Image (spheres, rainbow, N blue to C red):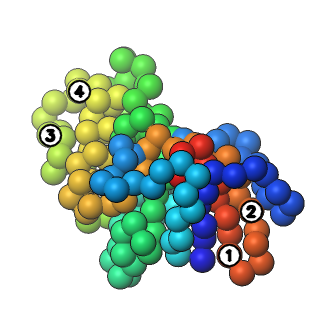
């Protein structure tokens, strides 16, 4: 079991070197409240979204069975900050996420579309289609080993 809470650091905790930081879903927990979930995915990039997709397909309930914590204010993570000159024609390749191809959301007939616009749109559409429980912006501060579970401490929930 994983517990999420805003708390002070304690022994057996590992601070995050590069902290991960939802538009809050309805009824999101107030700061300082512990949430119990089975799995916490840290980061809503390509790997995090793919993991969330497969967790849902395995039958874990969003929000209770698993959550995704992401530090970015919106979908797309680091892609939001890419150079304007990086377009779909200059990117080596955008790999499809499981269950939904990039071309379903972003037309490949427009190679001059900026990657900083196209990839966040794709990730947002993916989160929405599969109703993934992505919380943002949430910075993960510490992950603590509690022997029978982990405790994930954040700046928000």
Q: Is residue 105 left or right of residue 16?
A: left
Whole-number angstrom distance, CA of label 1 to CA of label 4 = 44 Å
Residue with the mark numbered 2: 144
In this view, the mark in front (1 or 3): 1
Residue at position x 35%, y 28% in the image: 116
The disc, 1 or 4, on the residue closer to the chain's N-terminal end is 4
Residue with the mark numbered 1: 149
Whole-number angstrom distance, CA of label 1 to CA of label 3 = 44 Å
Q: Is residue 145 left or right of residue 127?
A: right
Whole-number angstrom distance, CA of label 4 to CA of label 2 = 42 Å
Q: Position of residue 132 (x, y in %)?
A: 33, 60
Cβ atoms at labels 1 and 4 below 8 Å apart: no
The disc, 4 or 2, on the residue closer to the chain's N-terminal end is 4
Q: Position of residue 48 (x, y in %)?
A: 47, 57
Residue at position x 61%, y 57% in the image: 5
The disc, 1 or 2, on the residue closer to the chain's N-terminal end is 2
**Whether residue 150 is visible:** yes
Secondary structure under tag 4 reads: loop
The disc, 2 or 3, on the residue closer to the chain's N-terminal end is 3
Secondary structure under tag 1 reads: loop
In this view, the mark in front (4 or 2): 2
**Quadrant the N terminus occupies:** bottom right
Residue with the mark numbered 4: 113
Whole-number angstrom distance, CA of label 3 to CA of label 4 = 9 Å
Q: Position of residue 55 (x, y in %)?
A: 41, 73
Residue 107, numbered label: 3
Q: Position of residue 34 (x, y in %)?
A: 57, 62
The disc, 1 or 3, on the residue closer to the chain's N-terminal end is 3
Q: Is residue 99 left or right of residue 136?
A: left
């Amino acid at each position: 079991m994983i517990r999420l809470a805003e708390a002070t650091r304690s022994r057996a905790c590992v601070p995050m070197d590069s902290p991960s930081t939802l538009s809050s879903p309805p009824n999101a927990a107030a700061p300082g409240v512990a949430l119990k979930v089975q799995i916490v995915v840290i980061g809503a990039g390509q790997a995090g979204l793919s993991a969330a997709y497969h967790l849902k397909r395995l039958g874990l309930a969003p929000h209770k069975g698993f959550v995704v914590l992401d530090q970015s204010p919106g979908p797309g993570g680091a892609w939001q900050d890419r150079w304007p000159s990086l377009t779909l024609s200059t990117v080596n390749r955008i790999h499809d996420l499981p269950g939904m191809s990039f071309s379903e959301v972003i037309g490949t007939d427009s190679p001059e579309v900026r990657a900083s616009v196209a990839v966040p749109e794709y990730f947002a559409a993916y989160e929405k289609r599969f109703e993934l429980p992505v919380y943002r912006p949430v910075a993960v501060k510490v992950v603590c080993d509690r022997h029978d579970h982990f405790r994930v401490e954040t700046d928000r929930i």
